[in-house]
Image: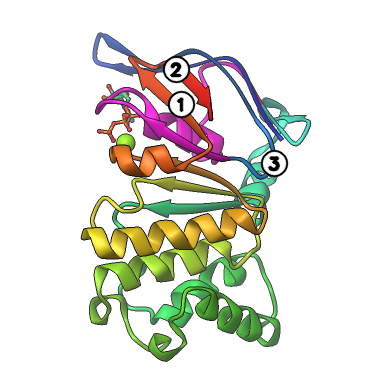
Amino acid sequence: MIRIENLSRKFEVGNQIVRALDHIDLEITKGEYISIMGVSGSGKSTLLNILGLLDTPTKGDYILSGINTSEMNDDEMAHIRSTKIGFVFQSFHLIPRLTAAENIEMPMVLAGIKPKDRQEKVEIALSHVSLNDRSDHKPEQLSGGQRQRVAIARSIVMEPDVLLADEPTGNLDSTSGIEIVRLIEDLNKAGLTLIVVTHDRKLGNRSDRLIRLLDGKIINDNVK
Ligand SMILES: Nc1ncnc2c1ncn2[C@@H]1O[C@H](COP(=O)(O)OP(=O)(O)OP(=O)(O)O)[C@@H](O)[C@H]1O
Ligand SMILES: [Mg+2]
């Protein structure tokens, strides 16, 4: 489903060059559960952003479902991002003035799905994360764990093939964290490809495959 070949991402800041990703090869099969670990600055978020088409490599190839992403134009990339890829971030990234239901609805609004078709999908997504009774709450009226559940509902409402989570439990206490982990693991068991960046060794050890980055290179790739 995903193939990365000799991929590098350089950043130039002033006269300094940062090799955030340095000649990476990686293959990911549909339905896998992968965690990505590594010290701060090792390139984890850069890799996730490239996988999610939020960023593009400086060199090398990213082949997604048989198509080389370097041959896609902006519209094609945006379409794949909105229909095939779900994102969850450490800091939730919810829109503060919208309710939980409206936040979850947003990807469908952007994709041009009709209002009457959206309602049912919002309900289903809310029940997936057990938040039907909080649908009218704004983010500030929800706990951290509930906010992350809204973010997960939003990320799956378009029924993506892959869920990319960048430290999804980083801002949560351990009880809410484990709830979130179980939730995304259940989605994986139902067929969603799951890729989680984490600093938490316990969380990293739960996955079927653990990839370690250091200085933009893959130093370990263990399938359990
Ligand atoms: N937009 C940018 N411009 C310049 N340098 C960047 C940019 N984004 C990332 N970098 C650099 O690339 C390297 C990798 O960054 P990245 O955010 O991928 O690390 P990370 O492994 O996610 O770290 P953390 O655990 O702290 O989130 C870092 O050295 C960082 O300074
Ligand atoms: Mg990061």
Residue drawn at x 56%, y 75% is 125
From the Cβ of disc 2, is ligand 1 less than 8 Å away? no
Find out whether residue 46 is within the magenta segment.
yes
C-alpha distance separating marks 2 and 3: 20 Å
Q: Which residues are magenta?
A: 33-62
Check disc 2 and report its element: helix, strand or loop: strand
C-alpha distance separating marks 2 and 1: 6 Å
Report the amino acid beneath label 1: Ile
Q: Horizontal and vertical percent for residue 121? A: 63, 78
Colour scheme employed for the rendering of this structure: rainbow
Report the amino acid beneath label 2: Asn
In the picture shown, does residue 54 fall above or below 60? below
Residue drawn at x 40%, y 38% is 205
- Where does label 2 land, which residue? 220
Q: Horizontal and vertical percent for residue 56? A: 53, 29
Quadrant where the N terminus sits is top right
Query: Can you see residue 90?
Result: yes
Q: Earlier in the sequence, mark 1 or mark 3?
A: 3
Callout 3: 10 Å neighbours few (<14), some, many (20+)? some
- Where does label 3 land, which residue? 30
Callout 1: 10 Å neighbours few (<14), some, many (20+)? some
In the picture shown, does residue 147 fall above or below 202? below
Residue drawn at x 57%, y 59% is 187
